[in-house]
Image (cartoon, rainbow, N blue to C red):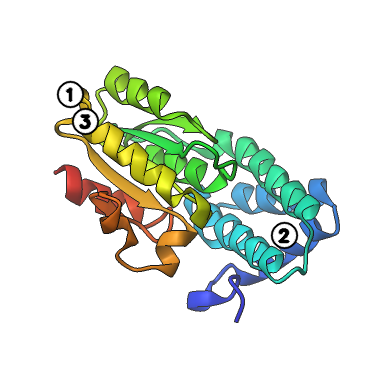
């Protein structure tokens, strides 16, 4: 079973067509598939969680087994980022819940699609999500947390090599006087592969995917 058909994904056919278009470098066709689904009433949340997220994970799996090249992985990821931008008009405003979050990738981590999905889905859930993007230095994360008076810091780590960087970031954040009430959540492939890893680096919690994070985050921040 690949990533597209896990959990009886009701959008598996769309995900498959989108993936095939990307792998064949038909970026505009891939984009049209997603925008047509959104125009037909499919929620952006479903498109993120049932199509874009599993496709990105499948591309990562294909890279791991040498079925796609680094260049193909980069092309597909850039195309998905473009699609996410084009979905912005379908992100209708929802009432704010009074919660603030900073979402970032650790320094040295350039895979930002997952973190961006987390930020967008938090916004869909009423959060004020401040998205920092790829490879953000710790000092800039600390500044953003202080400036935004954030209650949550969500950190993406996509490769095991960067887990130690995440550990140092958590340590630095804990030392800051601006983070006394801040909760830290982590996510990414290393935490899927090693249960309990999130706790060993000092985080308050973790989420297996972008869809699971908002509810867990609310439980943490109260």
Mark 3 or mark 2: name the one nearer the start of the chain. 2
Q: Which mark is residue 60?
A: none
In the image shown, does 201 or 128 lie closer to the viewer?
Answer: 201
Badge 1 density bin: few <14, some 14–19, many ≥20, Cα 10 Å: few
User: Does residue 31 appear anywhere in the picture?
Assistant: no
Q: Position of residue 138 (x, y in %)?
A: 40, 29
Placement of the C terminus among the 4 image quadrants: top left
Per the image, the residue denoted by label 2 is 18
Real-space CA distance between mark 3 and mark 2, rounded to the nearest whole angstrom: 44 Å
| Local secondary structure at mark 2 | helix
Question: Relative to 70, is 117 above or below?
Answer: above
| Residue 29 falls left or right of residue 216 | right
Residue ID at (17%, 23%):
177
Corner quadrant of residue 216: bottom left
Which residue sits furthest top? 147
Per the image, the residue denoted by label 1 is 177
Per the image, the residue denoted by label 3 is 175
Residue ID at (49%, 60%):
189
Badge 3 density bin: few <14, some 14–19, many ≥20, Cα 10 Å: few
């Amino acid at each position: 079973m690949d990533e597209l058909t896990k959990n009886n994904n009701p959008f598996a056919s769309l995900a498959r067509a989108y993936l095939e278009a990307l792998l064949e470098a038909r970026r505009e066709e891939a984009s049209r598939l997603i925008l047509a689904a959104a125009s037909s009433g499919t929620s952006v949340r479903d498109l993120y969680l049932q199509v874009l997220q599993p496709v990105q994970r499948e591309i990562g799996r294909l890279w791991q087994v040498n079925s796609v090249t680094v260049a193909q992985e980069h092309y597909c990821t850039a195309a998905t980022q473009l699609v996410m931008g084009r979905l912005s008009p379908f992100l209708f405003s929802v009432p704010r819940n009074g919660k603030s979050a900073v979402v970032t990738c650790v320094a040295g981590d350039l895979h930002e699609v997952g973190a961006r999905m987390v930020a967008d889905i938090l916004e869909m859930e009423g959060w004020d999500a401040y998205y920092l993007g790829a490879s953000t230095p710790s000092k800039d994360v600390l500044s953003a947390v202080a400036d935004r008076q954030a209650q949550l810091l969500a950190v993406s780590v996509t490769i095991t090599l960067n887990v130690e960087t995440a550990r140092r970031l958590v340590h630095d954040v804990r030392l800051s006087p601006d983070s006394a009430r801040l909760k830290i959540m982590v996510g990414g492939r290393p935490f899927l592969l090693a249960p309990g890893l999130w706790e060993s680096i000092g985080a308050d919690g973790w989420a297996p995917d972008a869809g699971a994070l908002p509810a867990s985050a609310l439980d943490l921040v109260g």
